[in-house]
Amino acid sequence: DIKAGIHTVTIAGGPLAFPCGKDDTILSGGLRAGIGLPHECLSGGCGKCYFDLAGGAVEDIWLEAKGLSPRARERGRRLACQSRPLGDCTIKLRPDPALAPPIRPARRPARLVSRRMLAPGMAEFAFAAEGAARFLPGQFALLQLPGVAGRRAYSMSNLANEDGRWEFVVRRVPGGAGTGRLFEMEEGAAVELDGPYGNAYLRTDTGRDIICIAGGSGLSPIISIARAAVADDELLEHRRITVFYGGRGPDDLCTTTFWQENRRLHTHAECHVAISDPTAAGAADWTGHRGFIHEIVQKVLASADMPNFDYYLCGPAPMVEALVELLETGASVPRGQIHYDSFF
Ligand code: FES
């Protein structure tokens, strides 16, 4: 029976209800149904997907998820990305039509077809899946890796394509179970790929210049956005693209590969690369910028009309927080022009 294990989740106070399969969380079930449930990371970290349970019962996948305080949990609050319905249930939250997925996420089996090293501890992984790879530049997918509990979020670095090719630039996290497994996988290894997800995708219709800012492992979605922008002749006619990319030292960065391989990127995107640690290996010979990436952004854009750009950010929490502070508080950039997904 195809309906077995499918429960109905109703949003209290409105007409909206959606089916939720046994392998789905309330959040993924809602997004698959095209409903704009509030969310950002799908990983229990950002806290944006909270709801109150008004009826029925749910199972908590990860009780320690830091997106919810113990106090809120005691009061009966839950995270939609960490809750599976145990039967039909009713939830209290306010959907936001602006967060309805532009492409409905779906699960599919995929195989690792190649891995190439880009820098020490950083590689590009390519997976092949059946059907077209449909996603927007800047979005991410959840990978279920063999032998690893739970799913891990990785952003695509390539562009949507008919060949079913999904590429990810990933930095190995010391002691990280997900990236550790990924770097050990042999070509041909099977995974489950679920996506696309994410709200920090390229907006092509604003008419504003584009500023892309990546720190360390945040390069993947930023490269996808920059590739998409330079591939769009109409966009290039009116908009400039500037990329900032920072890491601790030269070994943390993959500085040239994509610019060497993509002539349009080389021609149309201005790129500023920075290192922040003068004691890192190779730092003495570094000829690029020095300093934290938000400092470099501030310096380079000092005389520019900062509120008039669209910003795309991806990187570690301190970097994103410093940038949001700089842009929103320091430079009065409207919040709607700063795009990032909090994976922390
Ligand atoms: Fe659930 Fe971020 S989407 S905590």
Image (spheres, rainbow, N blue to C red):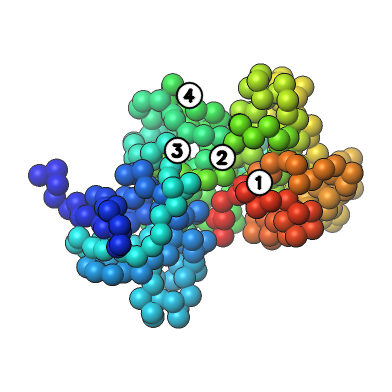
SS at mark 2 in the image: loop
Residue labelled with disc 4: 161
Q: Residues within 10 Å of mark 3 (few under 14, many from 20)?
A: some
State left or right for residue 330 relative to residue 196: right
Residue at the far left: name it. 1
Q: Nearer the viewer, residue 273 or 180?
A: 273
Q: Which residue is mark 2?
A: 201
Tell me the SS state at disc 3: loop
Q: Which mark is residue 337?
A: 1
Residue 43 is situated, as x and y percent measured from the top left of the image, at 46, 57
- Identity of the residue drawn at 69% across and 51% down: 334
Which one is nearer the viewer's eye here, 151 or 15?
15
Q: Which tag, 1 or 4, sits closer to the chain's start?
A: 4
Q: Which residue is mark 3?
A: 102
Amino acid marked by disc 4: Asn
The first of marks 3 and 1 along the sequence is: 3
